[in-house]
């Protein structure tokens, strides 16, 4: 059913359609509207689920872990510092192979405190072993949650659906919310692969020593490799069932003969597509590659689609000081030696808007080769001068 | 695509206004996108919200830099906020104020605009009469529908009823209809 609603409400309705049995909630901006929306659905009796208000994000995911180990389909949501606070449990959920689904309303990490969107929080747990999917639109956010429960339960691996905070979570958009019977046909009733049951006592997550830990970690990686084909298959089945394309490993836009390609993730894709169209109209062969799946990382797909490009710009909303963009590092591994020019672009940190004028200028500078190895989009150098001088005094010119 | 920027202060319903415009457009079968400026909203602080309306899917996710229309809920913003930034020279301006732009000293920036594109009305007072409180939203949305012809009054009223069921919605709808007729009347006379 077509609806004009807030992105968060769309996600809440999609999660409810997946019939979670336990929902753990702790508020943090900008994901709060999602768990609020779910609380209304539970309170009104439309969703039969145990709704548990917990005292922290650490508890939110810990309770989801307990519920999932007890055989319940479990869900929670968080953002930013909340994700960091539950970091230990994030690793445990993956290590215990529990098919939890969590929404991450992506947001910057302090200090300095900043409530706005970027991908620093997602990047902080990128090695935890979760499948991590990024939504480009609110429709895709809705659809990815429905796919996420199926993927998690098929692969015995938790799935994080990353939805850009504010830009998507707080946008009032048009969304097609599927009917309950359609989702029921797509997503079978949860049949736990492992379960704590007093009638059949067992342990989940017993200590593993040096003799087996490497094998456990190998299997965690192997599962992610298998997830590459599972993600594509689930997206195909979704398309057949619901009649629209959502999810999968990547979205390719105007790549056929593209010489210059921008690669990014999440909601910035819409604005990039607009600028790609402008560039094409002006006769320049540019294209866009949007990663939906960040974990597992679709290396082969990226290589297949981009190996003929001359210039690839990796635009990302995260920065590791002293290293650079984490996404760029991975793309560089895949394309080094194949694509002559690779540029890292850091953009949209702490909610700074990524606009068409900035992207036009970026393409223009890429065409003339006029970009630093790590280019900060719209960096205001005027406010840096005094600080730079202090650093120069302290450490000397280098 | 038609782009609307709503300026006001926290508590006046700036975000709700943009949402209602999007809902009204959706009810007409159009594509719409509404979003706030994501500031640390506080009562009384300047707030901006955006609404895009189009006949096909809206992909843009940047803030509205070049609006086709401005709805200004609070006339005390002019000294502190550059509300007219990027406004198209044939755009629309709707101000909640009993004083005209000229009387408020903001006339010069609007002189080049077609005269029926710049409109001011005492939305707070009309709201007081119909709703009992000086909430300007419904009045401004009714006036906007008449001023621009972008949305039918019935769609605006349906959006209001959906958001505010019952008596509150009815009172707001009466206020919207009153403003709509008042603006239509003033357009006919000139």
Image: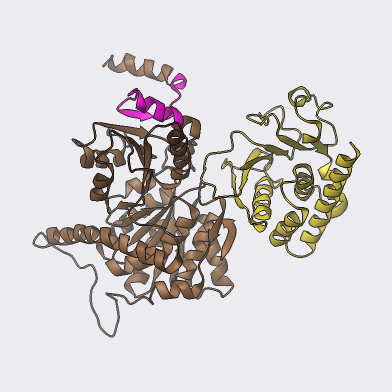
> Which image quarter holds the N terminus of chain B?
top right
Front one among A37 and A241: A241
Is residue A199 shown above or below A14? Answer: below
Color of chain B here?
yellow
Q: Residue at x 46, y 39 (%)?
A: A277
Please indicate, yes or no, whether residue A93 appears anywhere in the rendered image: no
Give coordinates of residue A301: x percent, y percent: 26, 50
Magenta range: A360-384
Is residue B19 shown above or below A396? Answer: below
Q: Residue at x 86, y 40 (%)?
A: B187
Q: Residue at x 47, y 51 (%)?
A: A137
Answer left or right for A189 relative to A341: right
Q: Residue furthest right?
A: B189
Give coordinates of residue A253: x percent, y percent: 39, 45
Q: Residue furthest left?
A: A211
Give coordinates of residue B93: x percent, y percent: 74, 35
Front one among A132 and B186: B186
**Residue A335 falls in image quadrant:** top left
Q: Residue at x 83, y 56 (%)?
A: B174
Please indicate, yes or no, whether residue A278 appears anywhere in the rendered image: yes
> Is residue A286 located in the magenta-colored stretch of the structure?
no
> Which image quarter holds the C terminus of chain B?
top right
Count every numbered label the image shows and give the total.
Answer: 0
Answer left or right for B136 relative to A309: right
Front one among A130 and A174: A174
> Is residue A362 located in the magenta-colored stretch of the structure?
yes
Q: Which chain gets the brown colouring?
A: A
**Residue B160 falls in image quadrant:** bottom right
Give coordinates of residue A22: x percent, y percent: 43, 70
């Amino acid at each position: 059913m077509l609806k004009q609603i807030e992105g968060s409400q769309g996600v809440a309705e999609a999660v409810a359609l997946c019939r979670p049995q336990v929902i753990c909630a702790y508020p943090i901006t900008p994901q709060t509207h999602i768990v609020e929306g779910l609380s209304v659905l539970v309170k009104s009796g439309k969703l039969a689920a145990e709704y548990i208000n917990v005292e922290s994000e650490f508890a939110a995911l810990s309770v989801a872990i307990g519920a999932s180990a007890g055989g319940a389909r479990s869900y929670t949501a968080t953002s930013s510092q909340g994700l960091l606070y539950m970091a230990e449990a994030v690793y445990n959920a993956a290590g215990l192979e529990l098919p939890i689904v969590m929404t991450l309303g992506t947001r910057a990490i302090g200090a300095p405190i900043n409530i706005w969107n970027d991908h620093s929080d997602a990047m902080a747990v990128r090695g935890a072993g979760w499948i991590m999917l990024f939504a480009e639109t609110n429709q895709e956010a809705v659809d990815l949650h429905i796919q996420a429960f199926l993927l998690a339960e098929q692969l015995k691996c938790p799935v994080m659906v990353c939805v850009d905070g504010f830009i998507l979570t707080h946008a009032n958009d048009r969304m097609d919310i599927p009917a309950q019977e359609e989702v029921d046909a797509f997503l079978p009733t949860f049949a736990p692969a492992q379960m704590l049951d007093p009638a059949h006592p067992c342990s989940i997550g017993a200590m593993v020593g040096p003799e087996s830990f490497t094998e456990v970690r190998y299997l965690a990686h192997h599962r992610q490799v298998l997830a590459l084909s599972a993600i594509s298959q689930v997206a195909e089945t979704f398309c057949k069932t619901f009649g629209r394309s959502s999810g999968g490993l990547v979205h390719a836009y105007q790549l056929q003969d593209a010489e210059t390609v921008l690669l990014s993730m999440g909601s910035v894709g819409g604005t990039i597509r607009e600028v790609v169209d402008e560039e094409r109209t002006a006769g320049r062969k540019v294209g866009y590659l949007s990663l939906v799946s960040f974990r597992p990382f679709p290396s082969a797909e990226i290589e297949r689609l981009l190996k003929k490009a001359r210039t690839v710009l990796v635009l990302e909303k995260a920065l590791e000081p002293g290293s650079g963009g984490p996404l760029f590092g991975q793309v560089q591994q895949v394309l080094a030696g194949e694509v002559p020019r690779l540029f890292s672009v850091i953009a949209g940190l702490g909610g700074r808007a990524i606009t068409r004028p900035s992207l036009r200028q970026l393409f223009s500078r890429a065409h003339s080769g006029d970009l630093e190895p790590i280019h900060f989009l719209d960096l205001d150098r005027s406010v840096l001068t005094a600080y730079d001088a202090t650093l120069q005094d302290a450490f000397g010119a280098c | 695509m038609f782009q609307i920027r709503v300026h006001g202060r926290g508590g006046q319903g700036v975000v709700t206004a943009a949402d209602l415009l999007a809902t009204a457009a959706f009810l007409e079968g159009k594509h719409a996108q509404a979003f706030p400026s994501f500031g640390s909203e506080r009562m009384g602080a300047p707030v901006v919200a955006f609404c895009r309306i189009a006949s096909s899917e809206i992909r843009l996710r940047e803030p509205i830099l070049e609006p086709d229309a401005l709805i200004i809920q609070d006339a005390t913003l002019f000294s502190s906020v550059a509300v007219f930034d990027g406004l198209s020279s044939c755009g629309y301006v709707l101000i909640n104020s009993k004083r005209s732009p000229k009387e408020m000293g903001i006339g010069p920036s609007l002189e080049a605009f077609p005269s029926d594109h710049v409109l001011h009305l005492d939305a707070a007072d009309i709201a007081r009469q119909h709703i009992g409180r000086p909430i300007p939203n419904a009045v401004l949305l009714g006036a906007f529908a008449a001023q621009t012809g972008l949305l039918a009054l019935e769609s605006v009223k349906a959006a209001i009823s959906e958001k505010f069921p019952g008596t509150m919605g009815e009172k707001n709808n009466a206020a919207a209809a009153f403003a709509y007729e008042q603006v239509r009347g003033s357009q006919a006379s000139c």
